[in-house]
Image (tube, rainbow, N blue to C red):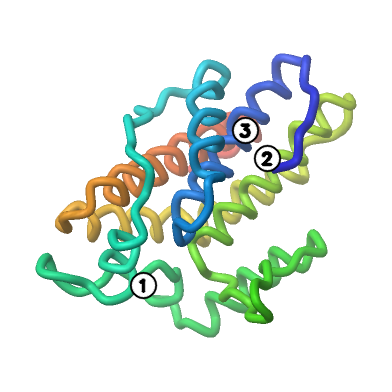
Amino acid sequence: MTQLEIKRPEALKAGARSILYAFLAGAFRYPEDESWAQLYSLAQGAMAHLPYTVQFPSLYPPRAEDYVHAFEVGGHYGAPCFIYEGEYGGGRLKVMEDALRFYDWFQLEPVQEDGKRERPDFLATELEFMHFLTFQEASALEANGDPRPYRLAQREFLRFHLMEFVQALASHLAGMNVPFYSAVASLARDTCSQDLRYLDNLLGVAR
């Protein structure tokens, strides 16, 4: 995660939101390295600077077997939960193309690992995009620039991609025996909901 020295109060708020999105993105990737512990610690520290309140859960490190059961093969608690937005409706191709348009506007591409490009509607990728946008907002605020383009993009991406996606994900995971992923899905749902409300107020937009 890129570091940015922040001093301005408004930039601190955007920076805290950016850290939280980075944590959530990391939490929904397959657990195979030690970066999660650092992200967890950073996210805990960022809570004091958030412009709204979310309940940050106490979590043990994610386990690979829980990820596999939750999102890939299922288990005794039922079928696996979709971790791709396009599987929840709206047309898989249409959802992916629309997400790519957001990324292309900021000259971004989904991360490629081992020569394989991840789907643009993968939850971790969408959360990483919000991390990028909030980081750019914090950078603009710290440099006394214009944060509005980044805030508008955040609001539209939340409305058209993440809001219904994380709500459906949290509902599905609540009925499965995977406490870690149930907790982070609830955190993602609450964060997106609070963030959208916060952006509406900042931008003076009524819903």
Q: Which residue is drawn at 53% across and 21% down?
A: 45
Quarter of the image for residue 166 reads bottom left
Q: Residues within 10 Å of mark 2 (few under 14, many from 20)?
A: many
Q: What element carries label 1?
A: helix
Left or right: residue 157 versus residue 169 is right
Q: Residues within 10 Å of mark 3 (few under 14, many from 20)?
A: few
Residue 183: which numbered mark, if any? none
Q: What percent of the width, then of the height, locates residue 15?
A: 67, 30
Q: What element carries label 3?
A: loop
Left or right: residue 35 versus residue 14 is left
3 and 2 marks in contact (CB < 8 Å): no
Query: Compared to 170, does 190 lie above or below?
Result: above
3 and 1 marks in contact (CB < 8 Å): no
Which quadrant is the N terminus positioned in?
A: top right
| Residue 51 seen from this side | no
Q: Which of 24 and 68 is in front in this view?
A: 68
Which residue is label 1 attached to?
A: 88
Work out how far the residue at label 2 is from the one at label 1, CA to CA, in angstroms. Answer: 26 Å
Report the label total.
Answer: 3
Which residue is label 3 attached to?
A: 204
Query: Compared to 6, does 151 lie above or below?
Result: below
Q: Which of 201 and 113 is in front in this view?
A: 113
Work out how far the residue at label 3 is from the one at label 2, CA to CA, in angstroms. Answer: 18 Å
Left or right: residue 194 versus residue 98 is left
Tell me the kind of residue under disc 2: Thr
| Residue 41 seen from this side | yes
Work out how far the residue at label 3 is from the one at label 1, CA to CA, in angstroms. Answer: 30 Å
Which residue is label 2 attached to?
A: 134
Quarter of the image for residue 8 reads top right
Query: Compared to 11, does 110 lie above or below?
Result: below
The mark nearer the N terminus, 2 or 1, is 1
